[in-house]
Every structure is written in structure tokens, then in C-alpha cells.
Amino acid sequence: MMIPFKEAQEIINLHANSFGEELIEIDNCFGRVLAENIQADRDYPPFNRSAMDGFAINVVDFENGINNFKIAEDVFAGQVSNYIIKEKECYKIMTGAPVPESANVVIRREDTEETSDSIIIKIQSLKKYQNISIKGEDIKSNEIILKSGQVCNHSILTALASIGKRLIKVQKLPTVAIFSTGNEIKPLNQDVLPYQIHDSNSYTIEAMLRQFLIKPTIKNILPDDEEILFQYLKNALDCNIIIISGGVSAGDADFIPNVLEKIGVKKIFHKVAIKPGKPFWCGKMPNGGLVFALPGNPMSCQVCFKLFIEPYLIECFGLSQKPIFKISLLEQKLKKVKLDEFFPCYIQSNPYGLLQTKFNGSGGITSTLDSHGLAIHKTKDENLEAGFEVDFLLW
């Protein structure tokens, strides 16, 4: 019995669990998912910091009508001054340097006339702490600055490094086995006969896993042979995830569902009311991991990964699901089957909207080449006219 794809997604995501946590060096953190809240180790900035190259004075002197100051000392970033300025004195100070306690305003160099040992202030007004970043104004000590469940990007790495965080707790990556099946499937290093094809699905799946930095621990091409399938799939049961392409439809050589049951994988569902990808199969391994058996056609493989495996991994990592956009079609789309149809489109900017890419069925190898994502032609909708808003999933 076929189930709607939304129901299939919900069922799969109910089985989502973290793959564990680990501590790694910050150098290896990019793209990984934080598994801890990050607190500031101290106030930031940790001192009153000059935001400009200029001159630091006590604003009371300026308020008392003084605008000519003697330079008492130069203060550079990474240097602390213990000198206390007197009336009519100032510091020459550089950006990033600690502002001494006896000063409370920094005047930009361009707002002064400077001689070798003194300055004249050219502006008419100043206020206390002008051009000074106050201690703790960015972050307070022990304040949570990053929450768990975020992918480490350049901004997050900047924050982590700024607070001296060298070891980071992140979500572990799953162990994944990928199997392409079929007597007609051959590896890239072998020549193919006219009735054979090169393996592409394992490369598709591996590439789509890369967005999570996941690399397969097992990757094989298997023939339509029950004994060989049994042995290889059984040996992969220690993995967190098994992804299979081919052998899952209703043909005489589609052995995958039976073999999976024989090795102890409990079927969750088989067949989803979508095109392409209808024969999609999902089951649970004895260790709690999931098996995803995808149809063998290239387009079906991509659609099923996008609809089911990607959201499952997002859920396992504790991330937010990707948004579904509403975008208007710029051309008519005819209804072909009473299923939810997923068809590749690209976004045109002027006029703004979606145009379909050339689609020669789920066996085509070029259908998604120029596409930005998948549009959904829902079961309930008949022919879609230009201007109709459809749900759109970015790759």
C-alpha cells in the first residue's frame, strides 16, 4: 500500500536519533554540528578598547574648554599603560589598544591638528566613551553565545576562536554503507557492453551525503544474486545507515526487500505515492539504524534522497529542516499521474519564477543538470497553468 510522501517523511523522522557526540579540534569543525552550548570565558571586549587610531583624553578637560593637549604617552594594541594623565594631557592611542583608566574618550586623528608632541582638537562636541568599545558590551562572561544544533560556519568558527575554544563537542557522523545493485551495473574502471551501464547512483548518494561531511565506510556494486546480496548486506548491519539503489521494484530480479527481511531488517514501509521514486523502501536494522532502498533510476535516486534521507539526517543532527518555498511557474505543467510529481526546475530572475528543465523520465541522466531544485505537482491539482504557485525544494 502506497503512503503519501509527507507521511513517509514523518514516519522516518520518528526513528531519528543522534549518532553520538565527540570532541574535535577547532581546525576540523567547519561543517560539523555543535553538540554543546558555548559560553564566553570572559567579558568581550575584556577591556575598554580604542575603536579608532587617535588620542585619548579625559572628557572633563574638554568640557572645561581645553582643546590643546600634550601627548604624554603612545599606547599600542597589546600594551598596557600605567601612566595617569594630568590636566591638558592625552595619550596617542592605536585601534585595539586598551584605553587607560584616566581617559574616557578617544578623538579620531582626523579630528585633530597634530604636532610632534601635542594636538589641537578641531571638533566642537564630544561625549563620554566616544570611540571606545566598553568592556563587556559585546559579550558578558559566562553568557551563552552559541547554542547547540548549529552547523559550524565561518562566523561560528570566528566566535569559537575569539573565546579561545580549541576543543569543540560536535555530533558524530554516522557510518554509512552504499550499495548499487543490478547485473547491468558496472564500475567506472570497466568497459560496458551495449546493454550495460556505468554505476552513477553510488556517486550521487555519496555526493549528497557530502553536504553533511559524511563519507561512506562501505561502497560496493552488487549483482542480482540473493546469496551475494545476503552476505554483503548482512556484513553491513553494524553501520548506522545502509543505502541501496536498485532491486526494490516488482520485477523477478528485485530481491532487496526479501533479502533485507532475511537478515533481520524490519520493514517500516514500502512504496510512496510519488513520481519518480514510488518503489522506495525503508526498514529498521537490529541495531536501530535505518535501511533506505531507493529505485535504481538516476532521477528517482536523487528525489528519494532529497525527500527522505536528507530530512532524516537533519533530524538526527538536531538541525532545523530546510524551508519549502512558494514560487510561481512561468509555463504550463500537465498532470501525468495521480501521484505527487516532483519535477526539476530552475529559477529565472526576470521575470521571476520557475521554468522546467528538460525531463525525459526518471531514467534520464541530464534532467537535474541545470536545475535549482524540485517543484511539486500535487496529486489534488490538475494541469498547472502559468502563474500557479508551487512548493519548491532547493537542492
Image (spheres, rainbow, N blue to C red):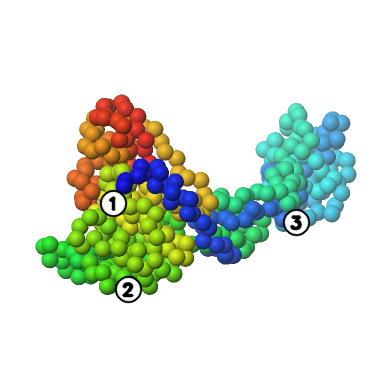
Which residue corresponds to the image point at 27% horizontal and 72% vertical from the top-left?
227
What amino acid type is highlighted by mark number 1? Pro
Picture quadrant where residue 295 is located: bottom left
Drawn side of residue 319 relative to residue 355, left or right = right
Tell us which disc is closer to us: 3 or 2.
Answer: 2
Q: CA distance from mark 3 to mark 2?
A: 68 Å
Tell us which disc is closer to us: 1 or 3.
Answer: 1
The mark nearer the N terminus, 1 or 3, is: 3
Crowding near the residue tagged with mark 2, few <14, some 14–19, many ≥20 C-alpha atoms within 10 Å = few
The mark nearer the N terminus, 2 or 1, is: 2
Picture quadrant where residue 322 is located: top left
Between 117 and 372, the residue placed more toward the observer is: 372
Which residue corresponds to the image point at 56% horizontal and 59% vertical from the top-left?
170
Q: Secondary structure at mark 2?
A: helix
**Farthest-out residue, left:** 194
The image position of residue 285, as x and y in percent, is: 42, 63
Which residue has dot 1 on it?
Answer: 279
The mark nearer the N terminus, 3 or 2, is: 3
Which residue corresponds to the image point at 39% horizontal and 33% vertical from the top-left?
326
Which residue has dot 3 on it?
Answer: 79
What amino acid type is highlighted by mark number 2? Gln
What amino acid type is highlighted by mark number 3? Gln
Q: Secondary structure at mark 1?
A: loop
Q: Are marks 3 and 2 in contact (CB under 8 Å)?
A: no
Crowding near the residue tagged with mark 1, few <14, some 14–19, many ≥20 C-alpha atoms within 10 Å = many
Q: CA distance from mark 2 to mark 1?
A: 23 Å
Which residue corresponds to the image point at 77% horizontal and 33% vertical from the top-left?
127
* Residue 125 higher or lower than 188, as above or below: above
Drawn side of residue 196 relative to residue 108, left or right = left
Which residue has dot 2 on it?
Answer: 231
The image position of residue 324, as x and y in percent, is: 42, 38
The image position of residue 339, as x and y in percent, is: 28, 39
